[in-house]
Each structure stands twice: as C-alpha cells, then as structure tokens.
C-alpha cells in the first residue's frame, strides 16, 4: 500500500522548507532531527518526487556548520533567479553565549547546491543578513526567510515580533545578495508577545497572498502590493482549521506548470510511547493548489493521487439510509454537489462493532456548510488524538464539494477549497470500515453520490 503523505523513515520532522521544482523533480526539504524523534539538532532533510505523491527520501541536505558556531538550520525557502538557478535562504541559529541565540541572535543565511540534484547544500555565511539591516528596530524571534522573484526584483519576507506584536517584515533585492529592509508589512493588532512564524508571499491570480503561522491556526490575507510595496488587504481567513498543529508552517512555491502549490506540516498528537514505537514523528500534508475564487483564497486538492488508487467505487446513499463498506485505513472519498438539505455524516476507520476511528459531520445552514471532525465514541482515551475541530465554509452556487483523504493517521478534509486536518490513531487493525449516512431529512432530497478510491 502506497502512502500519499510523506514522512522521513525515522525521527522528528517539522516545517517544509526550500520547496521547488527543478529538472522535473519536485524537491521538498524539511526541518529534521537526525538524532531523535523529538524536536532538536535541526538539519534540513530532503525528499524528491516526480509527481508530488511518491516521495523518495534522500540524505540530509544541510547540516549546521559547527565551525561557524551554527547549532540549527531553521526554516527557509528556495528562490530561482531569472536564469532558473536555485538559491536557498534559511535562518541560522547559534549559541546563546555567542549572541546567536534564537530570540535575539538569529541571522538569515544563504546556501547553495553543490550539485544539480540538490543532494548537498553548503551555507555561505558571508552573505548573512543580520539584525542591523533593520536600522534600530528591535525584533525578537526573527526568522524564516521566504523569497520570491517579482519581475526584475526579489522580495523577501521574514517573521518575528516587534513591540510584543507578531509581524511580517519585507525586504527587496535586485541580485539576491544585498537586501534593503523596506518595512513591517503587516503586524498583529494585539500585543500578546507571540511571534509570527514562516510567512509566505505569493502572487496568485492577480492578487498578493500572505500567510503566516502565529503559533496557532495558520492565517492568510488576500490583497495587493501597491507601487510602494504596501500591502492592501481585501480578504482574510484561516488556511486550515485543524487543531493541535495538525496543520502548521505551510510553504508554497510555483511549479513549472505555473501552479502555486502548498504543503504543510502535520504534527502528531499521540503519546510519546506510541511515537517511539512508530519511529517517526510528523508528516507532510497532500499538495494543495492555491487559487482565487470570488476574491477569496481557495486551496484545491491536486490530481495525481489516482495513480496510487484502485478503480473508483460509486456509492449511493438514499434518504434515511446508511451504507457501510470496507475502505481500509487509506482512501480518498469525493462527494461532489452536496445538496445542503442532505448532508452526509461519515464514520471513518471504524471497527466492526462501530467503535474506533473518527466522525466527519457536515451540516448546512443559511448558505454555509459546517464540517466537524472528532474521534468516535469508543476510541481509546490514550489515543484521543484531537479536540473536535470545526470549520464553516460558504456554499458555492448553493452547493458544496467534499474531498476527504484518510491516509493512516493523517486525515485531511476539504470543502469548497477550505480545509480541516486532523490526526486519528485507530487502535484496532481492523478499524477499516467507512459508513456514510444521510444526516438531514428534506422532503425529497437527492441521494448522496460518493466516489471511493481505496489506495493500492
Ligand atoms: C515553525 C518553526 C519555525 C522555525 C522552525 C524550527 O514550526 O518554529 O519558525 O524556523 O520551526 O524548527
């Protein structure tokens, strides 16, 4: 059986880094601890894929340079120059006693590949960006450089906290070497001391999109950059309403087809002993394609997973009925054109006695549809993976499309381009049943027509 969600074979991972496509390969670097399955000793792990769904783990790409006092290689990005050459940017963290600690001593470093396969990256601290660039503004937790090319100039955003308010900072460059600090681009209205991490800036469908990870649900802003590079916001929201970092620190990049694709980190919520036995800790989401619809950011599932699924099974559920099928713990379920008067209740990964696994409940009201994801009653307490998570999404032309991916313990639900992710840890190996039930009773509702793809 093929897993669609990437995770390294062993040990801890967090944020996706340096996402890019080069010579047909998709490259995914990630925060990685080669020495344990908890956060620490942060290197850049590396994986590559031809199709975004089948990932090959490669050797560690970037190692902290102890000779230069570096202790961790924090998050960063890849930007291709006008000739298509990749340049890497990341946050270098050193020892507190050397004034290079995480809160006040971070520097933004560059790294360049030693080979076209990006197997090994070497840091070039000579081009480091230090806090002096801010001309006296004091920034705590300054990190996570994200760089894009915008015509003839390059734009960098970083995250941090200024005057106890989380913020995104903006810089410009004409050559990817010398950078000018422009301004604090957006800043929290609340002085809660929480830094904003992993900001991204994308130019999508004629809009500028920003997103950032404020140690809570990842937020996005849609708007535009004016001639003087001020951000003017027209819309905002939550990228994924999953709880307990089941979706965090996402990064996006433009691929060779011109698609803006995003991956996020799905943290585990299982107890330590479970994770030790599992041997790895954390995985990536599926790819999501960013697009603007009716002025809002939608993230759509990306095709290509079908290669790893069997023939679709058509499932029809009529009013008052429920249907149970064997679906394994790895499947994709699509229900298009959901009629709001007839929303499904879905039980996933349940055991033959109906316990274990999770419930996804959809309900609709006033032109909106709400999804709720929760553990089923009877799932073992020690693996009660998440608090119930909930998200309400507008209907589109009176309808909703559901995409649900269950891939072992990684669960991702998308309704009309808006996502809710969670982790589910079924206890029974035979918790493989899928039940779809009609939740509402309109007078003459249309049946629910679902398509089930069990992964091979
Ligand atoms: C987000 C984050 C980043 C940092 C990295 C360290 O999860 O805290 O801000 O660069 O993880 O691993």
Image: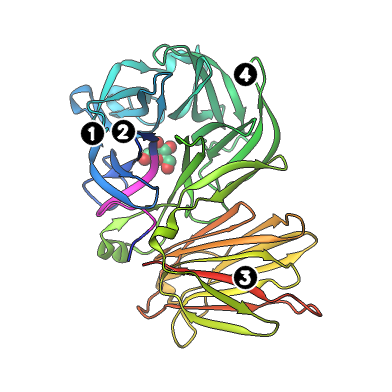
Query: Label 4: which residue?
Result: 229
**In the drawing, does residue 275 fall left or right of residue 289?**
left
User: Callout 2: helix, strand or loop?
Assistant: strand
- Distance, label 4 to label 1, CA atoms, is 35 Å
Q: How many numbered circles are shown?
A: 4
Few, some or many C-alpha atoms within 10 Å of disc 3 (few <14, some 14-19, many ≥20)?
Answer: some
The residue segment tinted magenta is 4-16
* Ligand 1 image position (quadrant): top left
The answer to whether residue 410 is seen in the rendering is yes
Give the secondary structure at mark 3: strand
- Residue designated by label 2: 73
Which of the two residues, 57 or 182, is positioned nearer the viewer here? 57
Q: Earlier in the sequence, mark 3 or mark 4?
A: 4
| The disc label shown at residue 63, or none | 1
Regarding residue 189, the answer to whether it shows in the image is no
Answer with mark 2 or mark 3, whichever residue precedes in sequence.
2
Q: Secondary structure at mark 4?
A: loop
Residue density around tag 1, few if under 14, some if 14–19, many if 20 or more, within 10 Å: many
Classify mark 1 as within 8 Å of ligand 1 or not, answering yes or no: no
Mark 2, residues whose alpha carbon is within 10 Å: few (<14), some, or many (≥20)?
Answer: many
* Image quadrant occupied by the C terminus: bottom left
The mark lying in front, picked from 4 and 1, is 4
Q: Nearer the viewer, residue 202 or 36?
A: 202
Could you give the CA–CA distance between mark 2 and mark 1, rounded to whole angstroms?
Answer: 7 Å
What residue is at 73 percent from the left and 54 percent from the top? 396
């Amino acid at each position: 059986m093929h897993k669609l969600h990437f995770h390294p074979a062993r040990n801890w991972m967090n944020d996706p880094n340096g996402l890019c496509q080069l010579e047909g390969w998709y490259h995914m670097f990630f925060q990685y601890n080669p020495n344990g399955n908890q956060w620490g000793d942060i290197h850049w792990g590396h994986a590559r894929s031809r199709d975004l769904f089948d990932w090959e783990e490669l050797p560690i790409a970037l190692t902290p340079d102890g000779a230069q006092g570096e202790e961790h290689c924090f998050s960063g990005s890849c930007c291709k120059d006008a000739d298509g050459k990749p340049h890497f940017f990341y946050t270098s963290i050193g020892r507190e006693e050397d004034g290079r600690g995480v809160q006040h001593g971070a520097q933004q470093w560059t790294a360049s590949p030693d080979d076209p396969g990006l197997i090994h990256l070497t840091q070039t601290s000579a081009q480091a960006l230090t806090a002096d660039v801010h001309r006296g503004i004091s920034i705590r937790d300054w990190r996570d450089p994200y760089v894009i090319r915008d015509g003839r100039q390059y734009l960098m955003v970083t995250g941090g906290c200024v005057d106890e308010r989380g913020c995104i900072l903006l810089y410009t460059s004409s050559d990817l070497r010398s950078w000018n600090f422009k301004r604090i681009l957006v800043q929290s209205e609340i002085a809660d001391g929480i830094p904003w991490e992993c900001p991204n800036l994308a130019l999508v469908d004629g809009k500028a999109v920003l997103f950032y990870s404020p140690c809570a649900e990842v937020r996005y802003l849609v708007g535009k950059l004016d001639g003087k590079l001020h951000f003017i916001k027209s819309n905002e929201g939550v990228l994924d309403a999953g709880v307990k970092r089941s979706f965090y620190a996402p990064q996006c990049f433009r691929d060779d087809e011109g698609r803006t694709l995003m991956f996020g980190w799905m943290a585990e919520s299982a107890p330590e002993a479970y994770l030790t036995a599992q041997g790895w800790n954390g995985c990536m989401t599926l790819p999501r394609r960013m697009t603007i619809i009716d002025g809002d950011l939608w993230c759509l599932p990306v095709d290509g997973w079908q290669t790893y699924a069997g023939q679709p099974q058509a499932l029809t559920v009529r009013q008052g009925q429920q249907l149970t099928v064997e679906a394994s713990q790895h499947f994709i379920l699509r229900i298009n054109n959901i009629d709001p008067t007839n929303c499904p209740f879905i039980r996933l990964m349940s055991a033959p006695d109906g316990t274990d696994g999770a419930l996804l409940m959809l309900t609709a009201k006033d032109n909106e549809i709400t999804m709720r994801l929760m553990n089923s009653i009877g799932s073992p307490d020690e693996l009660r993976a998440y608090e119930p998570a909930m998200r309400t999404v507008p209907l589109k032309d009176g309808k909703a499309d559901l995409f649900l991916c269950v891939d072992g313990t990684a669960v991702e639900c998308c309704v009309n381009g808006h996502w809710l992710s969670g982790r589910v840890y079924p206890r029974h190996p035979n918790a493989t049943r899928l039940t779809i039930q009609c939740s509402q009773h309109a007078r003459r509702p249309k049946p629910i027509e679902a398509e089930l793809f069990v992964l091979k």
